[in-house]
Each structure stands twice: as C-alpha cells, then as structure tokens.
C-alpha cells in the first residue's frame, strides 16, 4: 500500500473538527508540524484503526536517524496504490468491554500486542523482523516516484543503469535493489496480477 502526503501541518485541519481534537490529544498541541514531506510517497507497513480513526505507519522523514516507525492519521494522505502487502493479516484486539483496536500488518506485528512497543525500544528480534518485512514491502509494488528502471537481460538477469552491475533478483516485486550500489529501481520483470 502506498500513500502520498497531502498535508503535514496540524493547523490545516479545521479547528472545530473532531479530528483536530483527536490530534490535540495525541500530540498535546494542535499547532504541530509532522515529520512528513508533502508530495512524498510512503510505503504503509501497518494500518491501525482505533476510536474510529485510521493511522498509517510509515517510515517518515526522520526514520533513517531514529529508526522509529510512526503512525499518522490517514487524513494527511491520499492513497495512491490501495493494494495491501501479501504478508498482511488482520487482528482485532479487545481493549476492554467498549473499545477495540484493529491492526492490519505483517503477522508478527498484528498478532503480538507488544511488538510495536518492543520495536520502538530497539529490541533486536523485533528490529530484525521489521527490517526483513520492510525490505519485502519496499520492493513489493512499483513506486510512482522512482524514475530509474533496471534493464532486463536474458535469463532473468537485471542490469543497474547507475553502476552497470548485473544480478538475478531475489524477488519479482515491482521494485528491485541493486546489490552493488543499493539503487532502488523499478523492476522490468514485474507483472501485476489482477483478480
């Protein structure tokens, strides 16, 4: 699932709206700017629905330095690719007699109520699991903001246009990563199946 950021400023939410009040309860203020870049496309690694609000968990603009995956309210995004990852499952958690939370994510996160907290705490097992799942989901579908495409060679090999290295991809997802230079490229061997 891919989403495009359409706003990153809490002040742009109508002041009298329920969402503005919900945001104030989450952030402690309603004049906060989010660590999202307007126009950027993000891979969604989980969706959480709680108290009627959907949050998308994405690797925001500070992810590379914090390694914290953050959940942002869906109203800050437009869905640009609604296909969900093939590794996603759904889990409904009863919090008490009147409240529940629904999680759509990979199995380890969805089925373990403490996975996200341990991930934020930097626990080794959760970090390894997330890096593996993140790489899979990053490559699963084509990203419309990536302009470079690997060149298809005979026998299922690919050629990187940046460093001229060739490799056989491990995945037939919409994206591929050059093992030599790390370039993220569109995969010319990808075939989007339709139901």
Image: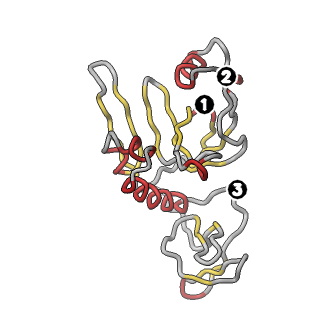
The answer for how far apart the CA atoms under marks 1 and 3 are is: 21 Å
Q: Secondary structure at mark 1?
A: helix
- Whole-angstrom CA distance, mark 2 to mark 3, is 26 Å
Residue 146 x, y percent position in the rendering: 69, 60
Which residue is rendered at x = 69% and y = 37% of the image?
A: 6
Q: Are marks 2 and 1 in contact (CB under 8 Å)?
A: yes
- Left or right: 20, with 161 as reference point: left
Q: Earlier in the sequence, mark 1 or mark 3?
A: 1
**Rendered position, 123 above or below 163:** above
Q: Residue 105 versus residue 26: which sits nearer the camera?
A: 26
Residue 168 in percent (x, y) is at 53, 81
Q: Which disc, if any, is residue 5?
A: none
Q: Quadrant of residue 31?
A: top right
SS at mark 3 in the image: loop
Mark pair 2, 1: CA separation: 9 Å
Q: How is the image coloured?
A: secondary structure
At a point 53% along the width and 76% down the height, the residue shown is 169
> In the current view of this chain or complex, which residue is farthest to the bottom?
154
Q: Quadrant of residue 60?
A: top right
The numbered dot on residue 145 is 3
Residue that carries the numbered disc 2 in the rendered image: 13
How many numbered circles are shown? Answer: 3
Q: Label 1: which residue?
A: 75
The x, y position of residue 93, in whole percent, is 31, 33
Q: State whether residue 1 appears in this view.
A: no
Name the foreground residue: 136 vs 64.
64
């Amino acid at each position: 699932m891919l989403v495009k950021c359409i706003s990153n400023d809490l002040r742009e939410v109508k002041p009298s709206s329920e969402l503005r009040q919900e945001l104030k309860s989450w952030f402690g203020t309603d004049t906060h700017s989010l660590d999202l870049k307007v126009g950027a496309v993000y891979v969604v690694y989980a969706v959480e629905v709680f108290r009627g609000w959907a949050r998308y968990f994405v690797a925001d603009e500070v992810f590379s330095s914090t390694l914290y995956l953050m959940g942002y309210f869906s109203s800050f995004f437009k869905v640009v690719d609604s296909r969900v990852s093939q590794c996603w499952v759904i889990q409904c958690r009863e919090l008490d007699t009147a409240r529940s939370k629904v999680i759509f994510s990979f199995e380890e996160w969805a089925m373990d109520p403490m996975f996200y907290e341990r991930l934020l705490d930097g626990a080794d097992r959760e970090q390894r699991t997330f890096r593996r799942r993140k790489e899979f989901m990053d490559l699963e579908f084509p990203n419309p903001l990536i302009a470079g495409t690997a060149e298809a060679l005979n026998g299922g090999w690919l050629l990187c246009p940046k460093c001229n290295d060739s490799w056989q991809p491990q995945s037939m997802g919409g994206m591929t990563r050059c093992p030599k230079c790390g370039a993220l490229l569109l995969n010319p061997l990808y075939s989007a199946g339709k139901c």
